[in-house]
Image (cartoon, rainbow, N blue to C red):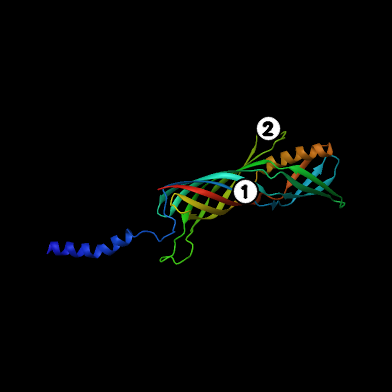
């Protein structure tokens, strides 16, 4: 009787075991224990909020800054934790060149300026979740989709800063979506993604830097008052993933 029960249990378990060993549909990205993805991309231009300049001679100006975008390059590493969950970290570098500034006085006078952007480093540590693929997968292409979220750091290094220290650190939150598809082998994948670095600016450091910048232009003391504290730095990226099973 016991042997019959064991045999029946074995027969019932066979379909589940067979399903667990079924290969992934052709073209679908297999899981990897670890992957490294060098990437290139662009940082999208963005505008800041309201800011005001006050000079030593009593004049005041509204500051309108148009932060330029620019090319970037970086690398991301991902380690699978369990099932669809993984931990990933990345570091990227960007320099956008110059950006435009318009100062508008209380009398309506406009002063156009051009300033250098700082070297910008963007880093994150995030938890990623792989979205489930349809089964059966009848798509012509079989990219895998991922969403991620985690803390981030944006570091700005000004090439000609009179401030103490070599750069400013601004913490934030990174939100990302990316997709990956195999390139004929499970060890290589094409990676395409978009990320938003929601950055909480250290406005005290920004105000000190801006005051030094405008003080040189007006040859007078200056103070800057920021009416914003966050910005969205959006990154579009394309990379090649080296995957290890």
> Callout 2 environment at 10 Å: few (<14), some (14 to 19), or many (20+)?
few
What is the C-alpha distance between the residues marked 1 and 2?
22 Å
> Callout 1 environment at 10 Å: few (<14), some (14 to 19), or many (20+)?
many
**Mark 2 sits on what residue?**
164
Place of residue 58 in the rendered image (x, y in percent of width and height, measured from the top left): 85, 43
Seen in the image, is 241 located left or right of residue 156? left
Place of residue 120 in the rendered image (x, y in percent of width and height, measured from the top left): 64, 42
Q: Is residue 152 visible?
A: yes
As helix, strand or loop, the secondary structure at mark 2 comes to: loop
Place of residue 129 in the rendered image (x, y in percent of width and height, measured from the top left): 47, 55
Q: Is residue 221 visible?
A: no
Q: Residue at x 69, y 50 (%)?
A: 228
Seen in the image, is 34 located left or right of residue 207? left
**Mark 1 sits on what residue?**
199
Q: Nearer the viewer, residue 125 or 225?
A: 125
Which picture quadrant has residue 204? Answer: top right
As helix, strand or loop, the secondary structure at mark 1 comes to: strand
Place of residue 41 in the rendered image (x, y in percent of width and height, measured from the top left): 61, 49
Q: Residue at x 52, y 49 (%)?
A: 240
Furthest residue to the left? 1
Q: Residue at x 41, y 60 (%)?
A: 26
Q: Quadrant of the N terminus?
A: bottom left
Q: Which mark is residue 216?
A: none
């Amino acid at each position: 009787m016991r042997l019959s029960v064991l045999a029946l249990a074995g027969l019932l378990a066979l379909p589940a075991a067979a399903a667990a060993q079924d290969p992934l549909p052709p073209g679908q990205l297999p899981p990897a224990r670890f992957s490294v993805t060098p990437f290139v991309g662009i940082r999208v231009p963005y505008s800041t909020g309201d800011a005001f300049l006050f000079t030593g001679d009593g004049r005041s100006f509204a500051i309108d800054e148009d932060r330029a975008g620019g090319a970037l390059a970086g690398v991301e590493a991902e380690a699978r934790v369990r099932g669809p969950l993984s931990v990933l970290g990345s570091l990227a570098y960007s320099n956008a060149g110059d950006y435009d500034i318009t100062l508008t006085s209380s009398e309506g006078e406009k002063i156009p300026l051009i300033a250098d952007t700082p070297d910008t480093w963007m880093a994150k540590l995030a938890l990623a979740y792989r979205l489930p693929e349809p089964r059966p997968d009848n798509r012509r292409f079989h990219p895998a989709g991922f969403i991620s979220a985690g803390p981030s750091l944006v570091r700005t290094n000004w090439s000609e800063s009179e401030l103490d220290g070599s750069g400013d650190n601004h913490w934030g939150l990174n939100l990302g979506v990316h997709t990956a598809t195999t390139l004929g082998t499970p060890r290589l994948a094409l990676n395409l993604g978009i990320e938003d670095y929601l950055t909480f600016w250290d406005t005290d450091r920004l105000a000190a830097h801006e005051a030094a910048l405008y003080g040189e232009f007006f040859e007078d003391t200056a103070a800057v008052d920021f009416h914003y504290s966050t910005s969205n730095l959006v990154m579009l990226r394309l990379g090649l993933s080296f995957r290890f099973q």
